[in-house]
């Protein structure tokens, strides 16, 4: 995987972590055991991606499915990109139209990489997801 692709998702995970801790129950002065464990799992995932661990996709799937199961009120703040990035069971939470857009983005990225061309993931993502023109 290209560095810009991985870097984009590392940055997104860090931003998401900082966003999550602003909401209850994570914004509480005293965290419960489950919440502390969840945040530890979250930071461990970020470290695993930074260290390019082999089981990072499984760790990400486990974190996101735990998030959806245990904190449904916070599901709207999960970036859709993370569901796609970790794949597996996470894809069950994405509509087909959204999957098609991320698949197109990946195809463009793979094509550019196979041709040895630079691929600006964030820019292409914005165009395909219709966030920019």
Image (spheres, rainbow, N blue to C red):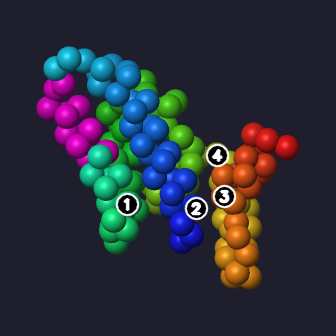
Mark 4 vs 2, N-terminal side:
2
Instruction: Answer whether residue 92 is visible to the viewer in this image.
Output: no
In the image shown, does 104 or 91 lie closer to the viewer?
A: 104
Q: Which residue is mark 3?
A: 121
Q: Is residue 30 above or below residue 128?
A: above
Q: Which residue is mark 4?
A: 95
Which class describes the residues within 10 Å of circle 2: few (<14), some (14-19), or many (20+)?
Answer: some
Task: Please state if 127 lies on the left or on the right of 43 as rendered.
Answer: right
Q: Could you say where residue 8 lies in the image, as x and y percent from the top left?
A: 55, 53
At x 31%, y 45%, the residue is: 42
In the image shown, does 70 or 116 lie closer to the viewer?
A: 116
Verify CB contact (< 8 Å) between mark 3 and mark 4.
no
- Find the magenta span and give its range: 31-42
Q: Which residue is mark 1?
A: 50
Instruction: Answer whether residue 67 is visible to the viewer in this image.
Output: yes
Seen from this angle, which residue lies furthest bottom? 115
> Dot 3: what SS?
helix
Verify CB contact (< 8 Å) between mark 1 and mark 2.
no
Task: Please state if 56 lies on the left or on the right of 79 as rendered.
Answer: left
| Quadrant assignment for the N terminus | bottom right
Mark 3 vs 4, N-terminal side:
4
In the image shown, does 37 or 9 lie closer to the viewer?
A: 9
At x 73%, y 62%, the residue is: 104
Say the numbered circle drawn on residue 4: 2
Verify CB contact (< 8 Å) between mark 1 and mark 3.
no
> Dot 2: what SS?
helix
Verify CB contact (< 8 Å) between mark 2 and mark 3.
yes
C-alpha gap between disc 4 and disc 1: 29 Å
Q: Quadrant of residue 18?
A: top left
What main secondary structure does the magenta stretch of the protein show? helix
């Amino acid at each position: 995987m290209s560095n810009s692709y991985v870097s984009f998702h590392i940055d997104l995970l860090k931003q998401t972590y900082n966003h999550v801790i602003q909401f209850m129950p994570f914004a509480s002065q005293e965290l419960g055991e489950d919440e502390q464990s969840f945040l530890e799992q979250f930071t461990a995932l970020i470290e695993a991606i930074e260290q390019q661990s082999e089981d990072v996709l499984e760790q990400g799937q486990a974190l996101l499915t735990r998030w959806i199961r245990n904190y449904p009120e916070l599901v709207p703040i999960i970036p859709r990109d993370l569901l796609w990035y970790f794949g597996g069971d996470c894809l069950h939470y994405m509509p087909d139209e959204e999957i098609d857009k991320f698949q197109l983005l990946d195809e463009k990225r793979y094509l550019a990489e196979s041709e040895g061309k630079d691929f600006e993931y964030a820019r292409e993502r914005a165009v395909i997801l219709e966030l920019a023109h």
